[in-house]
Structures are given as C-alpha cells and as structure tokens.
Amino acid sequence: MSSSSKENTTYPFDYLASSVEGYQERYAADVTEKSFFGFPMKSILSAERRLLDPKEPSIAYFSMEYGLAPSIYNSFQLSGRAINEKNQFFSHEVFSNYWLADYVFKVQIDKMLDIPIYSGGLGVLAGDTIKSAADLGFPFVGIGILWNKGYFKQNFWYKHGQVPEELEWDPHTYPGLVPLKNIIHIDTQEGPLALRLWKYYVYSYDKKRVCPLVLLDSNVEQNPEHFRRLTDQLYRSDDVWWKIYQRSILGIGGMRALASLGYAITRYHLNEGHAAFALIEKYINLEDKSQMQEEKNKFLFTCHTPVAAGHDRFFIHDTARVLPQQYVDAAQMFGKETPDSDQINLTYIALNNAQKMNAVAQKHGEVMRIQFPAFSGKIQAITNGIHPHTWVSEGMAELFDRYDETFGDWRAEPERLAQVMTLKTNDAFRKDLFEAHQKNKEQMIGTVNHWELSKDIMTIAWARRIASYKRPALIFYDINRLVDLAKKHGPMQILFAGKAHPNDNIGGSHIDKILDHIDQLNPYKDLIKVLILENYDTYFGKLLTSSVDVWLNNPLPPFEASGTSGMKAIINGVLQASTLDGWVVEAEHDDIGWIFGYRHSGGDLGSETNSRLAEDSSALYETLDQIMALYYQVNQKGRVDIHSAWIDKMIHCIARSAFFNTQRMVKQYNELMWGI
Ligand SMILES: *Cc1c(COP(=O)(O)O)cnc(C)c1O
C-alpha cells in the first residue's frame, strides 16, 4: 500500500495540537507543525487523515501488551525538557560465579527505559507488527493499555531469588507519549469507568510513514480509587476481578476509543483472546442484531499459545460482578466451550466469531487444530517474525550495506538477505562476517566489563520469559557433564536473563535453581563463567541476541507456539541450539545450528508437566560436545579459520532471516486475513 497519491490532503496540525491534554504547558516545544519529538509531523498528519477517511480501508489491532523501546528504535528527542530520571534508569545487579565483581559492581545502562507496557514475546511481536505495518504503509492503529506501574521491576536477592518491585515511571514526560483530551466510559456493575486515551506514534524505519498506538488509562481523577489502579500492572492475576476488568478495558474500551477518535475502521484484529470483548461490544451496539453476521467478517484473530493457562476462562457469576447483564448474556451466547458450561472462554468468543484466524507458526497450526478440532477448517498458520531494522545490530547492518550489490535495499526488502548464499565462497565476506560478530561480542563484553568475559571463549545465552515449558535451567541438569565438556574442549561462558510472573511460584523457583547452580559452579569459574542479568528487556534482548556465539532455545515441544528471540539471533549470524518446536521446525533443514531433544509428532499434545529434563539435558550435552569442538576450530584463541563450517552456519542463519521477519508476516496477514 502506498499513501503517496493522497499525501497532499492532510489533517490539520491545529486539530492535532488541540486534541492533546496540556498541549501549551507541556508539549508545545516537542510537538510542532514540523516535528513530533524530532520526527517528521507530516507523516502523522497523513496517517491520521487516512484513518479518518471512511473510504479508506483500515485496521485496528488490539493487544494487551506492546514491546517498544526508544533505546533500539524510534529514538524520539526532547527539546523542551530534560529526560526524567524515572524514565531512564537502570542499574542492574548481576549474579555470577565470579563473586568479587557481583559484590562491587552493577551493570549501568544509560538509556531510556522501554515503554514498560509488555511482559515478553507477545508484546515484542505486537510492537514489531506496528513497525512493519508502518514500513508497508498500511492505515493501521494499535490499541493497548497504558500500564502505570509497568509489568514489574525485577530484583534478585541472594538466596531469595526474584523479588518483584513496583516499577515507577512517568508517562507525562516520556518522549513520544501524549495524553489526549478524549475520555471514554465503559459501563460496569460498579458504575461508569472512565478511561483517558493516550497516543504514541510508531514510525517506519525511514520515518516517512507512521501508525498511531492508542493506549487506555484508568488513572483519571473522576474514577474511584480502586478503578484508578485497574491499569497499574500488566497481567495482574491475584484476583479474577482484575483480569475481567483489564480485558474489558482492552476490548470494550478499545472499541469505544476508536469511536471517540472518529476512526473509520474496517478490520479488527485481535492479538490473542484477551481482546475478545471487542466482539461483544460490537454486538451490543447493533440495533439490528441480524447484522452481526456481516460485522463478524471484519474480525480477525491471532492465537498465540498452546499452553492451557494461556486461555482466559471466567465464571459467568464472576463476569456478572463486573459487566452489565446484556454483556454477560452476549458473552455466554458466543463464548461457552460446551452448552452447559458455567464459564466463558475468551478464546472461544474469538474462535466462534472471527472470520479468519491464524496460528503463529506452521507447527502451532497443527497443534491448534488438535486443540480446537471444531475450528480446524478455519485455522491458518502465519509464522511470526521480527522487525529487521530493530533487531539487526549496527555492525551487521554496516556489513550488509558494504556488500550492497548483494543485499540492495535490504531494509525495505528483507527477503534480499537470502542473497547472502551467493557470498558463501567469498573469503573476504566470510572474514568480514566473523569480524563483525566479534565486534558485537566485544560490545556486549564491554557492557559487563567487570565480569571479565573473553571474546575468544564459546559463549551461549538463554534469555526469555521464565516459564516452565521453556525449561530455563535445562543446561544445569548435570553440572558434572557440563564441567567435563569444558575440560575436554575449552572454557565456556553462559549468560542468562528473564523475568518470572510475580504470581508464578514455579517460575520463581526456576530462578532460585539457576542461582543455586551458579553457586555450585563457583569452584569452576575458570572453566565455566555464568552470569544472570536482572530486568531482561528489549535492550538486553538486542545486546544478547546479537553478540553471543550460540542462542539456546530449549522449550518442551509442542508448547512453544513460535518463539521469536532466535529470529533476532539469526539476522545477526548467531547460531541456534534448539529443540524442534515453534518457528525452528520451519528451519529444521537449513543448517542454522543444532537441533536436539524430544520430537513431538501427531496425535495429542502430551503433558506440559512431563518436562523430560533427564533425556533432553543429555541430548543437549551431546550437542554441546559438537558445538564446542567446532567453536574451538573456528576460533583458536583469536586465530580464525575462515573456512570453518561454523561460518557456513552463520551464513545460513542470515539467509533464513530473509523469511522470519514481520515484513513478510504483515504482508501475509493482509493476503490471508485483512484483504485490503
Ligand atoms: C524477543 C523477546 C522475547 C521473546 O523471546 P522468546 O525466546 O521468543 O520467548 C521476550 N522478551 C524480550 C525482552 C524480548 O526481546
């Protein structure tokens, strides 16, 4: 899609400025006729006009979370104000088996905090989706929630594991985020709930196009105190009351936000079942209910999780404590798993009503058809991706630019990265590629300099949300075997990071285990150095995925719907050590690293609780034996064998990243679901 034909007719800037709450006092210096926090205003005016135009098809995308981070993308500038320290921090503790450094130092990251409105991969995908929608010029608006206390701030306390803390940040001084005068209301059993709308603008990589992100916020004066806290913490789950409210805000509030802004939306895309009340809101507002059939055609649904706990189910009596009776009735009509069920299931509301739906990898498509056989004919698979411009390191981007005859405009056409195969026999390129990787590794080592890592030691990382099916501590299952490997081949460096949901005791216990294993490895610190970093976020995500030698991904098949962190790694030439699950199934035969462990096939899903640690850790150690042998062949204490099969694998990684990106994914969303 292109907006070029309509670029002349724009939306008036004055209208935009007058919609911002406190414009004169707070935002006049940063939001001007020419510039939005240093980015072109022109792109915004044209995007707004297209969303308001009833003749133009457009997409509203609903997601509970968005991973967006000015430290790695969309780095807005402030002219009138200093950056608020609350939006800036962090110093992060590190726990390692190199105790001396832990006692004295912290990792200092002098960057803007991510907008703290995500918890993990689902949010990062939503953020990358908006960026690619902007790159491709779709009239697209994201709907989400302004989490006033974020997800949470993670502290590790020695011997106490993860201790969560409320995160403090200040949306009013966060560059690029502006409160609107629009306040909408939703009806609840406890009276009207007021929600302020905020806007953030997500630009294309070349800043020529933009998509707005609208965030709902219950922290407004006219709400009673307990309502004001509803949008404090993402995925607050200590009481079902919070859950139902948070989903009502996203689904019902989201639809009302679109109406309040006057956006003429023709497609509603629900990212996960959390947003399913949007369908109920649509139904309630129809004067003639028989029109619902036609309205359903506008709804699309992306399902992200094969894990049963990932699907929201609420008792009807709990829902009736929150929502007016007509909503509860409609939710029962659309969302029961079986006619006599006393629960509504948000995934079923979406499955029953959305015209089209997708799983997030081909393997997940198979799994979803097993989970929801009644819908198997409707379930398509569109594999997730990552936004290339966000996740490619500066060093790799420079390398691709230097070989521009091969890669061309790879930012606009990431499929061009597949051309790297033509350089496989080019010795200069092979050398340059390994050097670019070593530079990335040095940069990461510099960030944690007090822990004295070496660029010539095989380095492996595991970093993601801590969830049981992802088996975070697998590599430590048998410490002796790990030590034996290092004795046989040479030393090893292992990096960890990840947050466990504060109410997830099992997740917390995985962190405890990792801390214990790190202690056990203290006597071996010259052979194996292990670090775990606090507060995994997209900044650390990019730092680690672009710099280590091997990215470890060991979920229990088939419970990883897709996974995306490995995709960030391959665009940076970082090899994979992975079980066969999620997106990796689609790269099984591409020689992008090593695949090990349990293979799921057909029939039923098996049990999440049978985590197969003994067998799969053993398979992992056998694989590490091969990995280390090859690593110490390509890198012999700094002497590089450019003809090594290791570099072949790096090249295959980059070639495969031509497919695993959100540019391709968003195009497929349009071809298979939006149809605009
Ligand atoms: C990419 C990313 C994830 C997703 O990782 P998976 O391995 O796909 O689970 C989670 N958190 C952050 C901060 C990320 O950048």
Image (cartoon, helix red, strand yellow):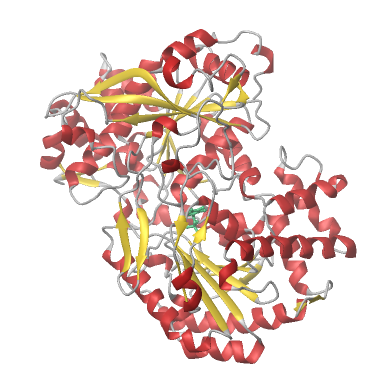
Question: Which quarter of the rendering shows the C terminus?
Answer: top right
Asked which quadrant contains residue 255, the reply is: top left
In this view, 97 is above or below 539: below
In this view, 33 is above or below 239: above
Q: Position of residue 528 (x, y in %)?
A: 56, 82
Q: In this figure, what is the number of numbered marks?
A: 0
Observer-nearest of 60 and 144: 144
Q: Position of residue 533 (x, y in %)?
A: 47, 64
Question: Which quarter of the rendering shows the N terminus?
Answer: top right
> In this orientation, does residue 474 appear?
yes
Q: As drawn, is 479 to the left or to the right of 6? A: left
Residue at 50% x, 73% y: name it. Answer: 101
Q: Position of residue 389 (x, y in %)?
A: 65, 43
Residue at 33% x, 52% y: name it. Answer: 310
Residue at 26% x, 34% y: name it. Answer: 248
Observer-nearest of 215 and 557: 215
Q: Position of residue 421 (x, y in %)?
A: 80, 57
> In this orientation, does residue 567 appear?
no
Residue at 65% x, 35% y: name it. Answer: 205
In this view, 275 is above or below 608: above
